[in-house]
Amino acid sequence: MIFSGRPAVAPARHREPPEAARVTPNHQWEERFMDDSIDIQEPDVSEDAERVLVAVEDRAAIRILVIDDEPSILESCETVLTGEGYGCQVERRGEEALRRLKSETYEIVLIDQNMPQVHGLDILAELRKRNPDCLAVVMTGHATTEDGVRAIQAGAWDYLPKPFTATQLLVLIGRAAFTLLRAQKVTQPSQREGLLVERGTTILGVSASMREAVNKALKVAPTDASVFITGESGTGKELFAQYIHRQSRRSRKPFVAVNCAALPGELLESEMFGHKRGAFTGAIRDKAGLLEVADHGSFFLHELAEMPLAIQAKLLRVLQDGVLRRVGSEKDDAVVDVRFISATNRDPEEALKNGVLRNDLYYRLRVVPIHLPSLRERPEDIPVLIRHFVDHFWRRHQLPGEAPPRLAGETLEALIHYPWPGNVRELQNVIENMVVLADPDEEIPAERLSILDQSPEMSSGNGFGPALDLRMPFHDAKQLLVDRFEREYLAHLVARTGGNMSESARQAGIDRTTLYRLMDKHKLAREAFAS
């Protein structure tokens, strides 16, 4: 059965991945650079089935509303969904649908994008206002990524291109229902602790900024849209990339991560694209690249701004049409279907300005941006992270059954107020060091903290906030100092002029637009300085 408002179009034939792209036995990976620069995770095959296997008694509690102006689609959807045990209602007119959404609550709503009189995205906007917990699916008229991205950006949980089959409908609704039920079971008890655990991925935080990042990841995960993650080193960019992959329809396929800064250019190109026999000294046989290994899965480009421009140009063609050419080859060697997730700890706009990142590549990879805040920007999350790391490392390093150590009040205060230039990664290291040296049920004083022994390696002469750890990567340290300077300078400037933005811009020698942009960047409100 195919649902469509027009004559059915045969669905595209499923393309089997090329032989070289399939996950191979472990002994075939021996020649790869198996270090922190490359990470290949084979999928959990059992999980995809679990997404759509929702118990009949659970389906009955899920109310679904289908909004479409085509009677045939409404009738077909209602027949299929009620036949599977879901509570399904249908609505043909947009105005009536809006009225119904004001008076009734649904767990899942399917909305036709191109409704007459009231556009589908307008209905979606109203739904998001009235019931933000509802999962909205937009039915698009064409099987294009652009329509789907627009729907996701407008707040949809997923999109369903027309025409679609009954199986496609049920799989999508099953995934949505599974997401709802999992949220009830997993996140409800853990929200008090600020903990979200997803198939081995632990994301912690009670702060609004972290919740916003997680919600954005959940929205974009079911799509194939490229995601661009920014944030300082140690904020968890790869963790988020894994989380997005595990929530996606590609979760049964590999997640391949490459650190572009960890490999020299020639080796990075060979690892990503593969090579032909004789392409360079030591190339004794043909070798598939990691892009082929990731076929039908997700490919994570860590530290994208460090990738040589020549490889960026080569990658652009893969993004455009999926075609790749191995090093030393004179022909196209494979067509791949991968979902790209990229990340950088640098300012991408600065990288574009300096010519180290191609504009065309950046904007193709940055369909959905996600920014991860630094740990010093979310101090309310530090106690949550500390509890988690203490329990985790105590179980790993100490005897079972012994009570874990406790932090004295001044110890917790010291950790909360420390600037954490290395972010969560540094906090994790400090807590592990503390736990390994602690006795069971011991109260740990502040002087035991390893970070307090770093004074010879710290510089406090900059005058802008906490001391700078000179062991940080150069770009991180520079950006940290620039941010501190900008914030302190702006605060003193606008306070001196009593909040007069025109006078502030004149004294600073910059235009008002730049001043407002910098104020927004550092979350400084003019009203706070008005005399």
Image (tube, rainbow, N blue to C red):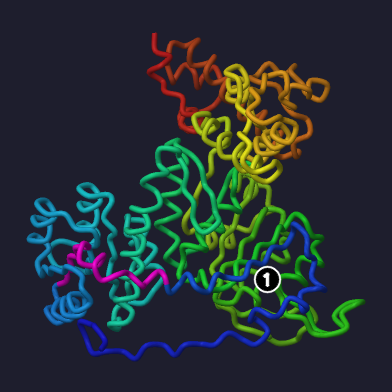
Residue, far front: 401
Whether the magenta-drawn stretch holds residue 495 is answered as no
Whether the magenta-drawn stretch holds residue 65 is answered as yes
Asked if 378 appears above or below 410 in the picture, the reply is: below
Residue at screen point 78% across, 30% down: 470
- The one of 408 and 306 positioned closer to us in this rendering: 408
Direction from residue 70 to residue 253 in the image, left or right: right
Q: Please state the extent of the stretch shown in magenta in the rendering.
A: 50-68
- The one of 8 and 350 positioned closer to us in this rendering: 8
Position of the N terminus by quadrant? bottom left
Asked if 279 appears above or below 251 in the picture, the reply is: below
Q: What percent of the width, then of the height, locates residue 211? A: 43, 43
Q: What percent of the width, then of the height, locates residue 111? A: 22, 66
- The one of 225 and 499 positioned closer to us in this rendering: 225
Residue at screen point 68% across, 71% down: 314
Asked if 248 appears above or below 429 in the picture, the reply is: below
Q: Quadrant of residue 241?
A: bottom right
Residue at screen point 53% across, 29% down: 379
